[in-house]
Image (cartoon, grey):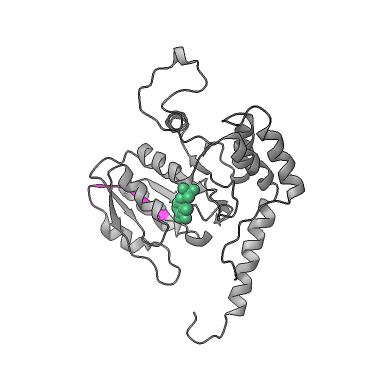
Amino acid sequence: MISLVKPYIAPSNEMMPAIEEVLYSGYIATGQAVYDFEDVFRNYIGNPLSLSLHSGTDALHIALILAGVKPGDEVISTPMTAEPTNTSIAMVGGKVVWGDINPNNGLLDPKSVRSLITERTKVIMLVHYAGMVCDMDEFNKISAEYNIPIIEDAAHALGSKYNGKMVGCNSPYTIFSLQAIKHLTTVDGGFLSLKNEEEMGRALKLRWFGLDKTRSRLENDITEVGFKYAMNNVNATIGLVQMKHINEVVGRYIENGKFYDKALVGINGVR
Ligand SMILES: Cc1ncc(COP(=O)(O)O)c(C=O)c1O
């Protein structure tokens, strides 16, 4: 059997001691390993306003809440994706409006998106399918013209760049997945990258029941109901070891892509 997607896991002499240490450390919930992993991840994509979550789906959910999507609001999205891109829209009561994709690359077509905008459009949801980045110049124009925020679903695009800039630094909301078959896996995990410090504060509360983790319980008052979406120290420890290999892993994906580009040239019916 040829596996289409095989998880990259760092060598066992690096991974296993780290996992053993955290498992028996007495602290496996959200703690220092998570904060260390967040620092490494933030440095890698170059956006300090990034927070870890238990999954990419959690990140989508929080992004949609921050963007203010309420029942009945429209979100223009793409069918060329995994289910969570669109089920998360339904989670906040939003209505998915299907954009057309460009048949040459499978990415959402800006012309189609423009034609679907109504007064109910609250968000444009982009998916950088298989690591290929959408036409951000056009989408940024549309976003500015209609004052509609973009959520970039970059579940497949950790390490992708557009015009030399890392994905995760451009739009008000970018989500990443660290699920089993993504470039960098922590078994399960996710990140949300933001552009606004106030929204960062709100997102941090939303990932932990609505509580401010920097204050004691007596000083806390839940004013907005949150979720249990935080990453734990075990996944974060795996992430810390995995991140040491991120350039090598992304490089491998690029090399594999080039291999297929070359090997499939001239085959009848393949474009
Ligand atoms: C395009 C896309 N968006 C979102 C997700 C959700 O990520 P997760 O599985 O980490 O919740 C995935 C992964 O399954 C995905 O492929």
Q: Residue at x 63, y 68 (%)?
A: 256
Q: Nearer the viewer, residue 62 or 230?
A: 230
Vertical relation: 4 (above or below) 13: below
Vertical relation: 215 (above or below) 157: above
Q: Is residue 151 left or right of residue 241?
A: left
Q: Nearer the viewer, residue 271 or 243?
A: 243
Query: Is residue 96 found inside the magenta-colored segment of the image?
Result: no
Q: Is residue 182 left or right of residue 8?
A: left
- Please, which residue is most extreme toward the right here? 13
Q: Nearer the viewer, residue 84 or 116?
A: 84
Rendered location of residue 181, percent (x, y): 55, 56
Q: Residue at x 67, y 34 (%)?
A: 22
Rendered location of residue 21, percent (x, y): 71, 35
What stretch of residues is rendered in magenta? 118-126
Rendered location of residue 120, percent (x, y): 23, 47
Rendered location of residue 224, percent (x, y): 35, 26
Q: Is residue 28 left or right of residue 93?
A: right
Answer yes or no: is residue 24 visible: yes
Answer yes or no: is residue 147 visible: no
Quadrant in the picture for residue 255: bottom right
Q: Residue at x 61, y 79 (%)?
A: 263
Q: Could you tell me what secondary structure mostly forms the magenta stretch?
A: strand
Vertical relation: 246 (above or below) 238: below
Q: Is residue 267 left or right of residue 134?
A: right
Query: Which image quarter holds the N terminus?
Result: bottom right
Quadrant in the picture for residue 164: bottom right
